[in-house]
Image (cartoon, grey):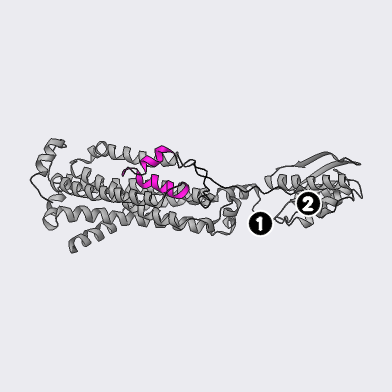
Amino acid sequence: MNKMGTIIGFTFKNKVRTKSFLITTLILVLLLSIGMNIPYFIKVFKGEDGSGSAQSPGVHIAVIAENGSRAAQLLQTYAQQSGTGATVVPYASENDPSLKQALSDGKVDGYLTLTEQKGTGLGSVVYHSKDDSSEEQSFLQSALQQVNAQLIAGDRLTPQQIAAMNAPVQLGTEKISADGESAEGKSHSLINYVIVYVLLILFFMSIMMTGNMIAAEVTSEKSSRIMEILITSASPLAQMFGKVIGIFLVGLLQIAIIAAAIAANLMLPHNSGVLQDFNLDLGQLSVSLLVFGIILYILGYFLYALMYAAVGSIVSRTEDLGQAVMPIMMLGFVNFYVPLFSISNANTMLVKVTSYVPFTSPLSMLLRIGVGDVAVWEIILSLLILLATIFGMGWLAAKIYRTGVLMYGKRPSIKELRKAMKAYKI
């Protein structure tokens, strides 16, 4: 056990210090940071970052209307009561020098030209701006609808009645199962879809990268004949499980660094409202998704890591490693792409079947837990099948590793490997 602990510590320290780990992790962190800050960079390049700008946050619109225009007054009143921080300023004409100066200084987003028709509300309405944003569109649509209703109703309705009349009806939804029973509580928030999508990519990359790392480590030691020296100081089983656990810690460290980078970017001042902009609420995040996600990642890692270690032990040259691990990589791609392409509908028969197949269940079951409908007994059954497969794969990988690390030359056939395995008992 002490020897295995030494191997775990040595493997972890050795891999963390390698240039490949450092460069890969740095590139991932940089790409994530750049991607999360692209909207801010665009604003900076456009000069909309707020530094040195006289314009305060919100919508700022000028209205071209005659003095005493009822529509302009109603727009101003609505802007003051809407709580959006919007401002509406009337100007005499489009050629007003103060309007042109306000547009040039960025104090006004654009100007509105409108006409009134007695008894029938607003006539033609045109909004002039350099960059018509969705925020301006949303404000104008709501404001002009209120103004138009007020102009038509005149004094017959109060502003509160008109606001109530124009308020959108809130439509509640309730999911039902196939038998018509209520499925309340099973709806999933948008944040769960985002977390599932991120975890799928993160876990797939981590499992594949660390798995290839294990296979390459074993093959390189075998091809350089270092394995013959190592085999005398520690048993093959201690070496295999020591490498698997050591590189597992490397994968966890990499995931922790990436998670910290995401959290750090979200805490930046210009990203403080990014979750609200996309209607994401961390308070709606399912805790069970994170708990089961960690469990499924650990189990999925050990299943694939043991396969990579076994395959790496029967390859004598690093040049042949890519071809040898290709079947495992294909399984990994199936494990990733089935849930990825089913994220919009996690209750298909394909996802349900793959959530019980041990080689695909880690990510398929993660999808069902996050954004699908899954019973507790289904999760337990899937985990038990996965655990049983890991124990079986551990026994088989130990047999292959024990014999494969000392078999040189061409890659042994299955018949030769079985014959050699019979000579050793695990």
The correct choice, above or below, for 17 with respect to 127 in the image is below
Q: Is residue 233 left or right of residue 280?
A: left
235 on left or right of 330:
left
Q: Quadrant of residue 315?
A: top left
* Secondary structure of the residue carrying numbered label 1: loop
Q: Residue at x 28, y 48 (%)?
A: 303
Q: Which mark is residue 51?
A: 1
Residue shown at 43% from the left, 46% from the top: 368
Main secondary-structure element of the magenta-colored stretch:
helix
Q: Identify the secondary structure beneath mark 2.
A: helix
Between residue 284 and residue 170, name the one nearer to us: 170
User: From the image, which quarter does the N terminus lie in?
Assistant: bottom left
| Location of residue 331 in the rendering, given as x and y in whole percent from the top left corner | 32, 39
At label 2, which amino acid type do we have?
Ala
Residue 3 visible in the displayed image: yes
Quarter-of-image position of residue 422: top left
In the image, what residue type sits under mark 1? Ser
Residue 14 seen in the figure = no
The residue sitting at the bottom extreme is 2
Dot 2 alpha-carbon crowd within 10 angstroms: few under 14, some 14 to 19, many 20 or more = some
Determine which of the numbered discs, if any, sits on residue 163 in the image: 2
Q: Look at the image and say whether residue 349 sits in the magenta stretch.
A: yes
The image position of residue 361, as x and y in percent, is 35, 45
- In magenta, the rendered stretch is 347-374
